[in-house]
Image (cartoon, rainbow, N blue to C red):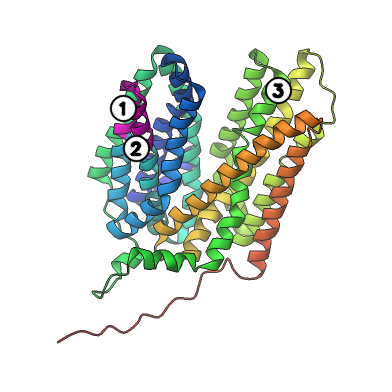
Amino acid sequence: MKGTIAQMRSYERSVQLLMVNQFTINLGFYMLMPYLAAHLSGTLGMAGWVVGLVLGVRNFSQQGMFLVGGTLADRLGYKPMIVAGCVLRTVGFATLGLVDSLPALLAASAATGLAGALFNPAVRAYLAADAGERRVEAFSLFNVFYQAGILLGPLVGMVLTGVDFRITCLVSAAIFAVLSIVQIRALPARRGDDAKNRKDGERESVLSQWRGILANRPFLLFSVAMIGSYVLMFQVYLALPLEVRRVGGEGNSGTAAMALLFAVSGLSTVLFQTRVTAWCKARMEPGRALTWGLLLMGVAFVPMIAATAVPVPDGGAALWLLAAVPPTLAAFLLAVGTMIVYPFEMDTIVRLSGDRLVATHYGLYNTICGVGITLGNLLTGVALDAARAAGLSALPWIALLALGLACAAALYGLHRTGRLAPPPVREAQPQHVSA
């Protein structure tokens, strides 16, 4: 951990602050969100479809507004969007703990989603700009803080929610309020290089900018190819826990196996991310690293395929081992694959953007991957149910393996054909100055 802190201190102050901010953002978010559904259905007694609606509104407002959030960050600056997102999440989380009417809950849920759409593209574009040539290493370190917040947040939330969920909401809101104040006072103002270098001529319209990004074929191909990585990684929260519960049951045995699964997934990133990135950067090009990372994420489901060939024991240690070991091994391999992919993925987006409208590119990328995750999870859930009903329990895992192999092949093709290289720099057009 000392090495991680020392590496963080080697960056300028803005980059250090962004990393601490992301840890705090995830801490505040994940100490609340895992327990929101139980609060809505239990404490407030809402029907399942209402709970799904409230949670769905948050996800939809975030995924649907990423492009807008990125565009605003490129036009108005990164700092205003980061601060606005934190302030909005302060209000949203406080409201979730203080109201019980459906309209108010929907408004609060939408606000928390919109907050993420405002600050996520801005944070990543800001980090990419100020990290400069050390962008890959910065995103590697950023992911350590990101995962640390995810790891610690639910533990803090469990303690607070054990007292009262409203306390969890208010503490989370207070964290975002303090974060807002710190960023207003300490985070330097920052705009993208394209905004700084823009001449005094007529400003390009938003629709024109969006058309230009949509015409960036390598960027769109890369975005579609990377959907698979998000679908695969999300199975740590969907298919793998469902399998643990199916085999291990709902008792203490299943709970312990679930805890091991999440602990291995989060801790491995915190402990090994920077070493994995340094090893990969020293030995391979970004395109090859992305390909190998996606390949490993697909192979992560091989232990699950093998486990389906083992008869389920009646109980005891053998049952626990079958419930815990294959999913935990799969989660670990998924984490390593993500460690390989993430820093080069974030860097590739910047390179494909040509260092122009970086936040807008991040926003569109997040939207494309978000839609892919939704569809991928829906299909995964359907496949799990259908496979169990048909007695073909290995089929979903084979499909996930095939998805990883297909995405790895797509990235390899993009790399070999040079489509992951930065676009040629456009020459500046001469400006006519009126007398």
Horizontal side of 327 relative to 170 (left or right) equals: right
What's the residue type where badge 3 is placed? Arg
- Residue under the image location 59 percent in, 29 percent down: 262
> Sequence order check: which comes first, mark 2 or mark 1?
1
Q: Residue at x 28, y 70 (%)?
A: 203
Report the label total: 3
Q: Which residue position is annotated with label 3?
A: 246
Percent coordinates x, y for residue 49 in the rendering: 50, 26
Mark 3–mark 1 Cα distance, whole angstroms, equals 36 Å
- Judged left or right of residue 44, residue 82 is left
Q: Position of residue 19 (x, y in %)?
A: 40, 43
In the drawing, does residue 288 fall left or right of residue 188?
Answer: right
Residue at 59% x, 53% y: name it: 226
The residue where tag 1 is placed is 95
Mark 2 — residue? 111
Apparent side of residue 27 relative to residue 186 in the rendered image (left or right): right
